[in-house]
Every structure is written in structure tokens, then in C-alpha cells.
């Protein structure tokens, strides 16, 4: 337990409102975590899986109404509404505190409250920030123990005096969706989450702290908190790093844990994962951008993960992993999900806890958003630089989305300002997997729409500012689209590990070792410069993938113009100018 008086005062306040019967401070020891694992298995909160097949692994099911992040009930509680901007829900902080405290009132009566001290980032790093989360959920404690560096060391890192830490207050309460709130108070470095027990809403170090609160801290302190994977490509002992942002359902985890195609493996290439979801990026002493993954584990989507789609991710989950809302195989005491293999359990229990037979079932065994929480160190491709307190130097930043026709396979922005425009106008088309119309364009600037903790216009201005500071040292910015389709709606590009072929072109552009063709939207490769050795594609196919259809891009520019109206005066002049340039180039 800490001696930090700010922390102690706050824990007293949480205690006085929630009134738990007992308070346990998490020290991060295996001994303490083991006790909690045993208790969770005794109460049925978790199921211990087969120790031979899945050592150290557990299954947990959440309530049926509590299986995903709830953007509609997520609020930025800044004093001025304008500071939250048009893309966030806003609540007045005093009103939010009053309402929430009423919901928290007595919510832990008869239960234990756990206080989790945790670090986002490795100890000894200038990037690292400390948080404390109070929760009444053992599941949260055990997940936080995987996703963060938690326990006594986090308390020591903060010390006895500092008030530079993030308050995270979580109570399951009645898991009532009508009273579910995920509130961020950026001016108080405080997060309050209630009536949920699902990961993204309750593992407060992740989206709430490392993105919504941290984006505010980053703006104040001159760095970037981004929803990006970090990937390293090594050859002959030299590793180059790329950070990439994608909206959901664009293969972010697969790119983060990429397996090089045979043609590059034969040349001695290796791919390393530094992070799969979040990057904190600072300008280093040499003026370059350095990126660090503040997390310590992966909270990945299980369905679709298999030995072919993502062997590295699957291997990561074979020990010391918590599975949430996947299907249970009662015969083997293991877990299963759609897309794992063709052998669904016949004596299964689905994610809702009902008997499920994979041979006859008409419903899904695992929830489409079911998850694995696995230690990053488990991954066969985890970067040797994962714990580097200085982060890794970035050569390129990639934005991406799912577009059937509009965006080419890859293009390079003309400069930093244009690159920020490319990120700000990022979009994906909806797929049949999501409810609602198919093919509708959803804008998701820098994949931060639900995660930027302040006004998106100010956020873009901050990006422009950081780029200006870095000058020629700033990474080059690219856009990729793995999802172009032919007339029959089939994907043309093979994707997965073969995406490395595009990354190779990107790195060659950074080096200045390959030419490009200037188009109205930026620079695209010459088709012959994308390595297609071993693929069932011709140079003409690649030319098709790189084609920029002027009519579609005119529609795109009109869509961007409409989107930008939302931001009024806060739209940076540089982005308005980029739009005008695009329109002129297309005229
Ligand atoms: C996630 C997300 O869970 O982006 O990582 O939704
Ligand atoms: Mn994410």
C-alpha cells in the first residue's frame, strides 16, 4: 500500500461512497493473483481450463447485455462543452460527479474493493504514467495484471508526493445498461465507469486512460497518444519501425503480428510486434519520432483467429490467458470460437452459458466480440525492444481503411500537412458484419473517433504542431487499403502477411530508393515496384489496385467537405487548404 497522500485520500473517498466490506491493495505478486484466481473459480466468475492444453488459462462470461464498448454512454466531462467537440458525448463535470456518485452509492456493500496501482509503459521510461483503479471485480484485477505493469513497482514509480496520476473508479453495480456510464474527466485526470464488467469499459488503463485521458495529456505536454499498432521489420540486424492506425475490422492485429511471406523470409527478414493497439509517440533528442506501447498485453478479438490468419496471435493465447465470451468445450475443458478450426465442440457451452452443439447449432458459439487477454511476452514475435524505455524510432506512419473502390492499395502523402489531412479524412465502408446498411462510408479520423478525449479540430491542430516541431525528421505518412474488390466483390489483394510487400515499398520511399507516380491524391507506386513474386497476381492487377478513379475521388472530396463542416472554426486552415488542393487536382 502506498504512502502517497493524494492516492490515500482518493481511495478513502471511493470507499466512503461505495462502502465495500473490505479493501485489498494489489501488490502484483503471483501469490496474491493466485489467491484471486482460486476465489474467482470458486464463485464461478471464471472457469479454470485444462492445465495441459491451456496452462494458466481461464474462461469468463460477461452479462449478455454487456459485451462491447458503449460509445453512446461514453462521455467527456470537460468544463466547457466546446472542449469535447462535435464527435464526443459531453456532460458537465459537476452534474456527472453528482449523478455518478448516486449510482456508486453503496454499490460495493458486502463486497471487496481492490485497489490496483498500475503503470502504462515500462518502469524507468520518460513516457510512463501511473494510474490507480478501484474496482469490485476480480476479473478486472486479473485482466489489469496482464494488460499493465501493476503492483508495488507502480506505487514506487509514483512516489509519496506526486499528484501526477490517473484516478480510475469502477463498480459493476447491477450491470444495468440504462445506468451504464463511462465518463472521462480530462481536467481532473479521472475516469468513472459503472454498471459494466466488459473489458473495453472497465480495464481503465486501455481506451479510457491510454487514449482519452492521455490524448489530453499529450496535447498539454507536446506528444501524441494514438490508436496505433507498432511494427518492426528487421534485416541484417537493422530494424525499421512503422506505426499504423486502422478502424475496427481492418486487420490491425494481423498486421501487428505479421508473418513475412516466403520471398522475404528467404531474404532473412523478420517482423516484430511492439504493439497491437496503442502508441505513445514523442519527439526524441535526435528530433525523430519515438513510439512506445504503453500496454503489457493484448486484448484481442478471438473469432477469426487461427493458425492461418494469425499464427502468432493464436500462439500468444496458448498459456496464461483469460478468454471472455468464447465457446466452452466441456469435453476437453478448452475454448473454441468461430474461425478457430473446423472442429466445433459437440458438447459445448455458448457465450451465453447455454448448451451448444457445433454440429447442429444455428447460433454462434462465441460472441463476435469475444476476446483473449494475453501477456505480450507470450507472443513469438514480440519485439526485443518491447520494454525499451525510449521507445522505437518511427520511419513511417500509416493510415488505412476498408474501401471497395476508392482508395488505392497504397499512396504517400505529399508532406506532413497533407498526411494529417489523409489521417483526418480516413474512412471505412461498413460491411455485412455490422448492423445497418452495407457500403456506407464512416469517417474515423486517425481511428480515434471514439477515443480522442477533446475537440477533434484541436487534435488535428496538435498533429500539425508536432509535425512542424519535428520538421524534416517527422515520419512520412502513407495510406493503405487492403480491401479493393473486383466486379464480383472478391478481394483482389491477398492481404495478411503479403501486406509486407506494400510495407517494403513504403520503406523504399522513406529511403528515397524508389520512384512514384504523382496523382491528384498523392504518390502511388509504379505497379512493377510492388513485389508480387509468388503471388497469383499480374502487374496489370497491381495497376488496377493502384488506380485512382477521378469520379469516385470527386465524390470523396464532397464527402470530406461535408464532414469538415462539423468542425466549424476549429478546422485547421491547413486541412481546408489540403481539401482545396485535392479539389483543384481533380478538376
Ligand atoms: C479495441 C477497439 O477493442 O479498438 O481495441 O475497439
Ligand atoms: Mn483498438
Image (cartoon, rainbow, N blue to C red):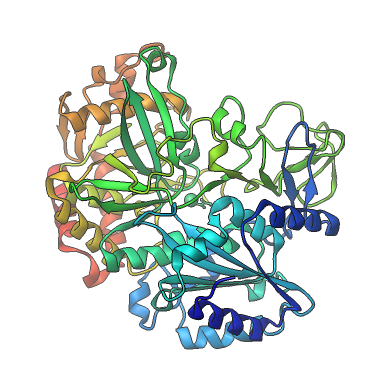
Q: Is residue 421 left or right of residue 123?
A: left
Q: Residue at x 22, y 43 (%)?
A: 475
Q: Is residue 39 left or right of residue 519?
A: right
Q: Position of residue 90 (x, y in %)?
A: 44, 76
Q: Residue at x 28, y 41 (%)?
A: 394
Q: Residue at x 80, y 58 (%)?
A: 39
Front-most of residues 377 and 329:
377
Q: Quadrant of residue 520?
A: top left
Q: Position of residue 42 (x, y in %)?
A: 85, 56
Q: Residue at x 72, y 77 (%)?
A: 108
Residue 498, placed above or below residue 433: above
Residue 515, placed above or below residue 403: above
Specify whether residue 170 is in view. yes
Q: Is residue 329 left or right of residue 504?
A: right
Residue 567, placed above or below residue 278: below
- In the rendered image, the quadrant that contains the C terminus is top left
Q: Quadrant of residue 83?
A: bottom left
Q: Is residue 52 left or right of residue 151?
A: right
Q: Position of residue 569 (x, y in %)?
A: 21, 72
Front-most of residues 563 and 508:
508
Q: How many marks?
A: 0
Q: Position of residue 45 (x, y in %)?
A: 78, 57
- In the rendered image, the quadrant that contains the N terminus is bottom right
Residue 529, placed above or below residue 521: above
Specify whether residue 555 is in view. no
Front-most of residues 448 and 122:
122
Amino acid at each position: 500500500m502506498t504512502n502517497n497522500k493524494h492516492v490515500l485520500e482518493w481511495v478513502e473517498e471511493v470507499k466512503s461512497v461505495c462502502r465495500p466490506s473490505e479493501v485489498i491493495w494489489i501488490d502484483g505478486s503471483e501469490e496474491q493473483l493466485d489467491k484471486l484466481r482460486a476465489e474467482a473459480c470458486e464463485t464461478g466468475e471464471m472457469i479454470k481450463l485444462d492445465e495441459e492444453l491451456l496452462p494458466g488459462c481461464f474462461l469468463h462470461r460477461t452479462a449478455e447485455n454487456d459485451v462491447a464498448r458503449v460509445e453512446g454512454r461514453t462521455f467527456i466531462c470537460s468544463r466547457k462543452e466546446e472542449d469535447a467537440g462535435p464527435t464526443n458525448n459531453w456532460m458537465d463535470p459537476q452534474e456527472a460527479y453528482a449523478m455518478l456518485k448516486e449510482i456508486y452509492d453503496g454499490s460495493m456493500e458486502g463486497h471487496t474493493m481492490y485497489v490496483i496501482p498500475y503503470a502504462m509503459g515500462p518502469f524507468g521510461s520518460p513516457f510512463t504514467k501511473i494510474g490507480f483503479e478501484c474496482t469490485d471485480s476480480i476479473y478486472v484485477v486479473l485482466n489489469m495484471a496482464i494488460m499493465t505493469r501493476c503492483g508495488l513497482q507502480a506505487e514506487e514509480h509514483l512516489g509519496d508526493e506526486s499528484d501526477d496520476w490517473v484516478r480510475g473508479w469502477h463498480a459493476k453495480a447491477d450491470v444495468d445498461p440504462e445506468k451504464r456510464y463511462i465518463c472521462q474527466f480530462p481536467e481532473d485526470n479521472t475516469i468513472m465507469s459503472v454498471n459494466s464488467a466488459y473489458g473495453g469499459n472497465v480495464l481503465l488503463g486501455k481506451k479510457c486512460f491510454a487514449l482519452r485521458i492521455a490524448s489530453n495529456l499529450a496535447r498539454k505536454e507536446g506528444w501524441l497518444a494514438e490508436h496505433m499498432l507498432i511494427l518492426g521489420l528487421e534485416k541484417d540486424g537493422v530494424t525499421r519501425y512503422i506505426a499504423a492506425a486502422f478502424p475496427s475490422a481492418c486487420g490491425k492485429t494481423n498486421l501487428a503480428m505479421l508473418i513475412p511471406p516466403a520471398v522475404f523470409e528467404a531474404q532473412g527478414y523478420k517482423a516484430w510486434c511492439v504493439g497491437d493497439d496503442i502508441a505513445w509517440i514523442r519527439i526524441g533528442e535526435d528530433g525523430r519520432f519515438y513510439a512506445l506501447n504503453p500496454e503489457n498485453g493484448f486484448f484481442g478479438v478471438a473469432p477469426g483467429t487461427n493458425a492461418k490468419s494469425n499464427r502468432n496471435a493464436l500462439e500468444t493465447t496458448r498459456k496464461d490467458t483469460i478468454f471472455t465470451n468464447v465457446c466452452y468445450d466441456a469435453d476437453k475443458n478448452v475454448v473454441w470460437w468461430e474461425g478457430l478450426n473446423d472442429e466445433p465442440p459437440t458438447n459445448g457451452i455458448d457465450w451465453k452459458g447455454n448448451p451448444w452443439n457445433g454440429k447442429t447449432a444455428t447460433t454462434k458459439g462465441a460472441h463476435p466480440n469475444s476476446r483473449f487477454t494475453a501477456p505480450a511476452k507470450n507472443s513469438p514475435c514480440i519485439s526485443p525492444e518491447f520494454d525499451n524505455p525510449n521507445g522505437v524510432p518511427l520511419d513511417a506512419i500509416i493510415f488505412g481503411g476498408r474501401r471497395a473502390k476508392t482508395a488505392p492499395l497504397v499512396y504517400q502523402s505529399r508532406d506532413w500537412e497533407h498526411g494529417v489531412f489523409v489521417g483526418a479524412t480516413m474512412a471505412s465502408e461498413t460491411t455485412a458484419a455490422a448492423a445497418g446498411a452495407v457500403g456506407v462510408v464512416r469517417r474515423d479520423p486517425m481511428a480515434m473517433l471514439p477515443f480522442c478525449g477533446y475537440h477533434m479540430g484541436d487534435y488535428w491542430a496538435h498533429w500539425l504542431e508536432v509535425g512542424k516541431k519535428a520538421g524534416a525528421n517527422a515520419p512520412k505518412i502513407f495510406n493503405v487499403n487492403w480491401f479493393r474488390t473486383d466486379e464480383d466483390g472478391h478481394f483482389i489483394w491477398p492481404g495478411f502477411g503479403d501486406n509486407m510487400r506494400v510495407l517494403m515499398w513504403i520503406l523504399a520511399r522513406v529511403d528515397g530508393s524508389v520512384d512514384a507516380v504523382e496523382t491528384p491524391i498523392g504518390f502511388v507506386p509504379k505497379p512493377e515496384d510492388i513485389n508480387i513474386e509468388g503471388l497469383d497476381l499480374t502487374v496489370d492487377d497491381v495497376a488496377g489496385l493502384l488506380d485512382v478513379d477521378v469520379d469516385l475521388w470527386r465524390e470523396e472530396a464532397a464527402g470530406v467537405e461535408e464532414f469538415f463542416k462539423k468542425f466549424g472554426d476549429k478546422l485547421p486552415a491547413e486541412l481546408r487548404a489540403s481539401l482545396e488542393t485535392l479539389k483543384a487536382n481533380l478538376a
